[in-house]
Image (spheres, rainbow, N blue to C red):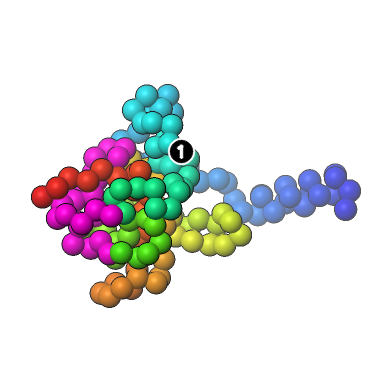
Amino acid sequence: MKRRGFLAVLAALLAARGPARAAAPFEITRSPEDWRARLTAAEYKVLREAGTERAYSSPLDREKRAGTFHCKGCDLPLYSSAAKFDSGTGWPSFYEALPGAIGTKPDRSLFMTRTECHCRRCGSHMGHIFDDGPPPTGKRHCINGIALRFAAA
């Protein structure tokens, strides 16, 4: 197919999808410059650009104390230590979030569809949710430790 034909097909496909949706409104919004000033480069890559930290690199994967895991971007409580379990994946894992703490959206990167989870207040990327967790939910919230702050009880 020639370039002009390819571009016409691409334009038709995009038009068929309808207008692009605006980003979900969050209670806390900041400019990229403000986020960069508040976060380290590694935190910015994960929280604002949906990056992934290296497996087994976060001390929060091994955190066993009672407490609450908060969003590093806005300090919203997201996960209770009571819902944490050792998934063996190298990332902090939880079978459920605190009520109303996270939002989700489809993530179609890496040639598959996954469920991305983010802080419902500031939109910071946390990780992904999978259907291979323990009871009672059967879910595994696989979270980047760098996106969290732990507050001991």
Q: In which quarter of the image is residue 29?
A: top left
Q: Farthest residue toward the right?
A: 2
Query: Would you say residue 120 sits in the magenta stretch?
Result: no
Res. 130 image quadrant = bottom left
Residue 38 % position (x, y): 34, 28
Left or right of residue 114, residue 14 in this image: right
Residue positioned 35% across, 43% down in the render: 146
Residue drawn at point x = 31 percent, y = 73 percent: 134
Residue 48 shows in this picture: no
Mark 1, secondary structure of its residue: helix
Q: Give the range drawn in magenta.
A: 62-85
Asked if residue 9 is positioned above or below residue 112 in the image, the reply reads above
- Taking 66 as reference, is 78 left or right? right
Measuring from the top left, give residue 87's x and y in whole percent. 35, 65
Residue 77 position in % (x across, y down)? 21, 48
Given residues 79 and 115, the one toward you in this image is 79
